[in-house]
Image (cartoon, rainbow, N blue to C red):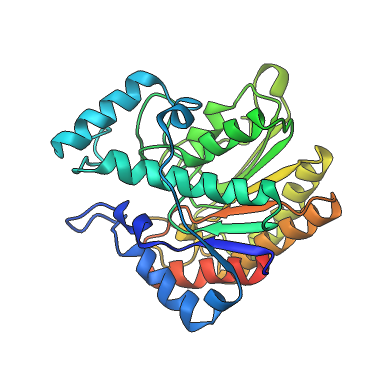
Amino acid sequence: MSSVAAIVSERLARYGFGDGHPFGPDRLAAFVREFDAQGLNRRVQILEPRMATDEELRSFHTSAYLEFVREASANGAGLLDAGDTPAFRGVYEAAATVVGATLSATEAIMRGDCRRAFVPIAGLHHAARERAAGFCVFNDCGVAIEQLKRAGLTRIAYVDIDAHHGDGVFYGFEDDPAVVFADLHEDGRYLYPGTGSAAETGRGAAVGVKLNVPLPPGADDEVFAQVWPQVLAHLEKFTPQFFILQCGADSIEGDPITHLRFSRKTHGRAARDLGALADRLGHGRVLALGGGGYNRVNIAQAWTAVVENLL
């Protein structure tokens, strides 16, 4: 049995917004076509998602926020945030299934059924504990971190190479020393959400546990290669027991809403190096989450490179 698992269920495609929204429901199919064409579907275990329970969602999100989304989901109209994230009928269930997929993959790794896993429609890193933001309804990364802490882990690494700063995760755990945070992103002066300056290194007991690396618009593989060793050194210093990689494809050249210029090689390298570090630390646990990406060709290329390198 393969040591790598992936969740490619059609149920994940229900998390997407219509009417030409950048985060459309076709993003999963764009990945799956390339995943199948490269024969990766025969080299990994295929897992099914489940829906996260309310109790699991409440480990990160507030009860009031869950009720707000439930109501908007029943009505199927309006906005969940200031304008980026529209409600649709069934959005609660679709978003809870993304979280459930991430938890299914997390649990499979923790049980030892696999050592690595990939979930394409996941990594919704902007959602805060009490609100939606930036196409993200529920923060599956945050829920997974909370569940890993409940399972007894005390050092969980969250690594983010999406073009946008993972603000929902950063501020959700800003003062939590158990969450070793490292985020490479386009400088917030040029891109949503405008956060993640190098001076943001955590608060209280977590000062120095968080690393933000803002990059200039146009930063390419060469720039990534210059700063990536700093990220690996930061992670290794804290010897994490589990790695979460948010590998958003919107940092690849040609994305319609961002300005970084990485190639698929960078995404492959990130997955490979984190796998090597996880192996060196003796556990091998890496969970990769698709994150953003709005050029369908880039999604297919970047995410298949991640799966290849997890293998």
Residue depicted at x 40% and y 37%: 138
Above/below status of 6 relative to 132: below
The quadrant holding residue 92 is top left
Q: Nearer the viewer, residue 246 or 5?
A: 5
Q: Nearer the viewer, residue 99 or 156?
A: 99
In the rendered structure, the answer to whether residue 189 lies left or right of residue 268 reads left
Q: Inspect this view and state whether residue 190 appears.
A: no
In the rendered structure, the answer to whether residue 114 lies left or right of residue 299 reads right
Residue depicted at x 61% and y 75%: 43
Return the x and y of residue 7 as percentages of the image width and height: 49, 60
Q: Inspect this view and state whether residue 308 appears.
A: yes
The quadrant holding residue 5 is bottom right
Q: Nearer the viewer, residue 237 or 34?
A: 34
Residue depicted at x 38% and y 64%: 28
The number of numbered discs placed on residues in the rendered structure image is 0
Q: Nearer the viewer, residue 260 or 3?
A: 3
In the rendered structure, the answer to whether residue 213 lies left or right of residue 168 reads right
Furthest toward the top, the residue is 204
Q: The N terminus lies in which quarter of the figure?
A: bottom right
Residue depicted at x 68% and y 16%: 204
Q: The C terminus lies in which quarter of the figure?
A: bottom right
Return the x and y of residue 290 as percentages of the image width and height: 49, 56
In the rendered structure, the answer to whether residue 170 lies left or right of residue 57 reads right
Return the x and y of residue 209 as percentages of the image width and height: 72, 31
Above/below status of 274 relative to 305: above
Above/below status of 128 relative to 181: above
